[in-house]
């Protein structure tokens, strides 16, 4: 556990590695790896964030997977999203059940749901 990563007495089964990873968390079953990963998460459960600022704005979104620098960066309440690649689903805020693969895949999506990105950026 890195300096300034999470600490809480109400949640369980969390893992945080990196500066300020999960630092505001009160929920359970989250994994954050990288500086700023799941930084603002408060009540969102069962999220996985790997990479610098992955899922950094998430507050209550749950069951999200972000793998890559700033993947799902602006997600706040969206759920069941999978983003793999730098800035994949970057602007998603409320969207749910989206899958984005590749650098900046579905970068403009903010609230859509059930969208599957192409494997490569067009």
Image (cartoon, rainbow, N blue to C red):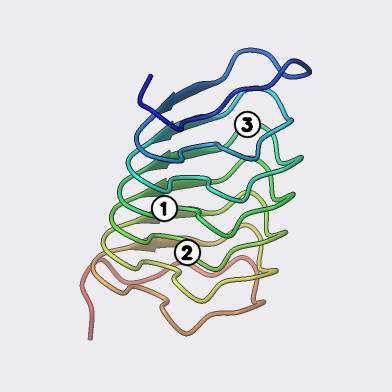
Instruction: Tell me which corner region of the image, top left, top right, bottom left or bottom right, holds residue 89.
Output: bottom left
Instruction: Tell me which corner region of the image, top left, top right, bottom left or bottom right, holds residue 85.
Output: bottom left
State the residue position of label 3: 46
- Please tell me which residue is depicted at 70% across the width and 69% down the height of the picture: 94
- Please tell me which residue is depicted at 39% across the width and 70% down the height of the picture: 117
Q: Earlier in the sequence, mark 2 or mark 1?
A: 1
Q: Distance between the residues labelled 1 and 3?
A: 14 Å
Q: Earlier in the sequence, mark 2 or mark 3?
A: 3
1 vs 3, front mark: 1
**In the orientation shown, which residue stands out farthest toward the front?**
3
State the residue position of label 1: 54
Q: How far apart are marks 2 and 1 (CA)?
A: 6 Å
State the residue position of label 2: 73
Dot 1, how many residues are within 10 Å of its Cα: few (below 14), some (14-19), or many (20+)? many
Q: In this view, does 59 lie above or below 110?
A: above
Position of residue 112 measured from the top left corner of the image (x, y, whole percent): 64, 76
Quadrant location, the C terminus: bottom left
Dot 2, how many residues are within 10 Å of its Cα: few (below 14), some (14-19), or many (20+)? many
- Drawn side of residue 4 relative to residue 59, left or right: left
Position of residue 93 measured from the top left corner of the image (x, y, whole percent): 64, 70
Residue 85 versus residue 39: which sits nearer the camera?
A: 39
């Amino acid at each position: 556990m890195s300096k300034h990563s999470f600490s809480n007495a109400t949640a369980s089964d969390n893992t945080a590695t990196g500066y300020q990873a999960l630092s505001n968390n009160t929920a359970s079953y989250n994994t954050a790896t990288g500086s700023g990963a799941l930084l603002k998460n408060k009540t969102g459960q069962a999220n996985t964030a790997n990479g610098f600022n992955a899922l950094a704005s998430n507050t209550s979104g749950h069951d999200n997977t972000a793998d890559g620098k700033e993947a799902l960066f602006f997600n706040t309440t969206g759920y069941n999203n999978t983003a793999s690649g730098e800035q994949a689903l970057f602007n998603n805020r409320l969207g749910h059940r989206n899958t984005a693969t590749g650098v900046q895949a579905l970068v403009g999506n903010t609230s859509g749901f059930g969208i599957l990105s192409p494997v490569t950026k067009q």
